[in-house]
Image (spheres, rainbow, N blue to C red):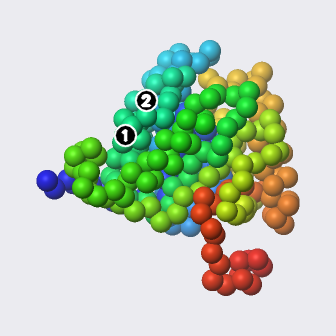
Amino acid sequence: MNVDLPEPLDVIAVGAHPDDVEIACGGTLAKLVQQGYRVGIIDLTDGEPTPLSPGPEHRLEEARKAAEILGIQVRETLELTNRRLFDSFENRVALATLFRKYRPKVVLGLAGKTPMASPDHWQAMQITDAAVFYSRLTKWNEHFSHTEPHTIQKQVWYPLGFGSLNYPEGSGQFVVDISETLDQKLESIRAYQSQFPPEKKRVYRLVESQNRLVGTSAGFEAGELFICATTLGVRDLVQTVCP
């Protein structure tokens, strides 16, 4: 069975809820778009209900506006259930089907648990890890809307929690320079007015201060930390360590 597919994406970032990706790596996504890459966001849930949001339609409009601010070409929301998100075969297949549809080279996903915050984040990490694997499996197309297998070249994790400076271990940590896109990132987070009203403005200070701390550690004005899921190889040592 032939399935019509859209133009491929270079990078897909996966979050449990709308605003996860913006908070953790919005600056990097904006920079990738500026560099000419096609970038997408997949939210596993619509993030509702929440205390101050009028409902899912409002939250989805906020997500659409945030993606527009970052320049994101594609944003999709899976119909999985907020607050009851669990790693399951069905949820793995739902995400892997979108990977097969958009055929990214790189997938960015959540790194580890976020203590004192939503347990959905940990479940999202497991779903994403499995979906990256499921995406390339052969002789199983009937589970993925008859899309063809697609091998994702690299998987990268992004830490989300701001309550701790301890990050999950991986095969290599690196920092992306977001000095020129930090303001754009913060603007995209402000699009979620239902989640971050004036009484929660400390969130912006937390995000900015951490991005400036991480960036300074790498010699930038601002940066975002990533963890490579597999060994990160280098072809040009000088260009890599002295960009």
Determine the residue positioned at 38% across, 47% down: 96
Q: Is residue 19 above or below residue 36?
A: above
- At label 2, which amino acid type do we have? Leu
The residue that label 1 is drawn on is: 94
Residue highlighted by disc 2: 80
Label at residue 197? none
Query: Is residue 180 something that shows in the picture?
Result: no
Q: Is residue 55 visible in this depiction of the protein?
A: yes
What's the CA distance linking mark 1 and mark 2?
A: 9 Å
The answer to whether residue 49 is above or below residue 228 is above
Measured from the top left, where is residue 211 in percent x and y? 78, 50
Judged left or right of residue 143, residue 45 is right
Instruction: Estimate the x, y position of residue 161 in percent, counting from the top left.
Output: 73, 39
Q: Classify mark 2: residues with Cα within 10 Å, few (<14), some (14-19) or many (20+).
A: some
Residue drawn at 33 percent across, 52 percent down: 101
Quick check: marks 1 and 2 in contact, CB under 8 Å? yes
Type of amino acid under label 1:
Ala
The residue closer to the viewer here, 59 or 101, is 101
Q: What is the x, y in percent for residue 108?
A: 56, 53
Q: Residue at x 62, y 23 (%)?
A: 194
On screen, 56 above or below 89? above
Q: Is residue 205 left or right of residue 185?
A: right
- Check disc 1: other Cα within 10 Å, few if <14, some if 14-19, many if 20+: many
The quadrant in which the C terminus is found is: bottom right
> Could you say which quadrant of the image residue 216 lies in?
bottom right
Q: Give residue 95's quadrant in the image.
A: top left
**Residue 131, position as x, y percentages in the image:** 43, 48
